[in-house]
Image: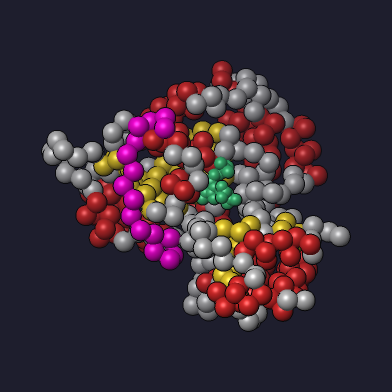
Amino acid sequence: MKRIDLRSDTVTQPTEGMRQAMARAVVGDDVYGEDPTVRQLEERMADIVGKEVGLFVASGTMANLVALLTHAGRGDEVIVGHLAHTFLYEVGGSAALGGIHTCLLPNREDGTLDLGAVDAAIRDREDVHVPRTKLLCLENTHNRCGGSALSVEYVDAAARLARSRGVAVHIDGARLFNAARAQRVAPAELARGADSVAVCLSKGLGAPVGSVLCGSRDFIREARRWRKTVGGGMRQAGILAAAGLYALDHHVDRLDQDHANARRLAQGIAEIPGFSTPQSHPAATAWTNLVYLAIAPSLAEKHGLDAAALSRQLRERGVLASAIGKDGLQLRLVTHLDVAASDIDVALEALRSAARGT
Ligand code: TLP
């Protein structure tokens, strides 16, 4: 039985072409600044997102951590949404290693923060009682908000506000290319208001490892020191960067397929009695490759079908999905490079039979 792995877009296997590109990569010691393939990737990504310089790092978590450590010092404050990946899933690294204070604001369903609330949350610099607000963090696409893509207009407005109050902006763009493809805009447009942006190669782009943090020359000079501090100085990392370059050549436009598959999956889920998904809403145009499924409490009570039970039943049919959230009634299903359109039919059939209790 073929395994259809919808747990995350991080599970992809490098393609044959990608493996060949990795095998052929010209490498050097990147801590000495001598790896030509890493340099090429950093330049290329910086160019794509419209920033001066890029920095290749091991993961999305490291990219965000290094960015936060560079933007803010001990006791400084960073404004972040309550469903942000940096807040929920990055082990509190910025507090643990940087002594950075977090100001949490509620994320709206579409992943945005209310800009009036952001304005009100920015502290008075002259008041000795309060931390200094240094940074506003946005996430695009927003993982826990259903993979929704923030618009250029929203990011620009947030950036204008932050700049007018002397606050920098960082975008966790782990899935920035998904946001760009879904809205038919350039990644640079989505990032133009930000001081720094972190883009993952190992999510929808299908590379095995790595993220690129991009920003101004001065910002990246400091970030490079923080990368070394957290043990992220890699040596012949061009082998990994080559996979990223290959992904930029071959795996960007195809994200449309992932979005189409996710859309069909969401529509199919919405037709199953007892299941629902915000992604099936007809007015929603900026959903991407993440589908969140909610189980109706009545179904859970009648058949004992909570998220854990549903994911077990799916697994028996070869479909893997992640139970997510605190209520025990949500699953996340993610489309990616290794999911074919026909796999969506198999997944939907597995979901239908689980809901029927057969
Ligand atoms: N997200 C993973 C899990 O950690 C939840 C996933 O499967 O979606 N920013 C965002 C928005 C992310 O979704 C992730 C990974 C990261 C940062 C961290 O990237 P890595 O896993 O490379 O450290």
Task: Give the total number of marks visible in the rendering.
Answer: 0
Q: Position of residue 174 (x, y in %)?
A: 53, 48
Q: Does the magenta stretch include residue 302?
A: no
Q: Where is residue 298 in the image (x, y as percent from the top left)?
A: 57, 78
Q: Position of residue 82 (x, y in %)?
A: 39, 54
From where the camera sits, is residue 143 visible?
yes
Region in magenta: 96-111
**Looking at the image, which residue sits at the far top?**
32
Between 47 and 332, the one lying in front of the other is 332
Answer with the quarter of the image where residue 26 lies: top right
Answer with the quarter of the image where residue 303 lies: bottom right
Answer with the quarter of the image where residue 271 lies: bottom right
Q: How did the renderer colour the structure?
A: secondary structure
- Name which residue lies at 67% across and 59% down: 321
From where the camera sits, is residue 260 visible?
no
Between 114 and 353, the one lying in front of the other is 353
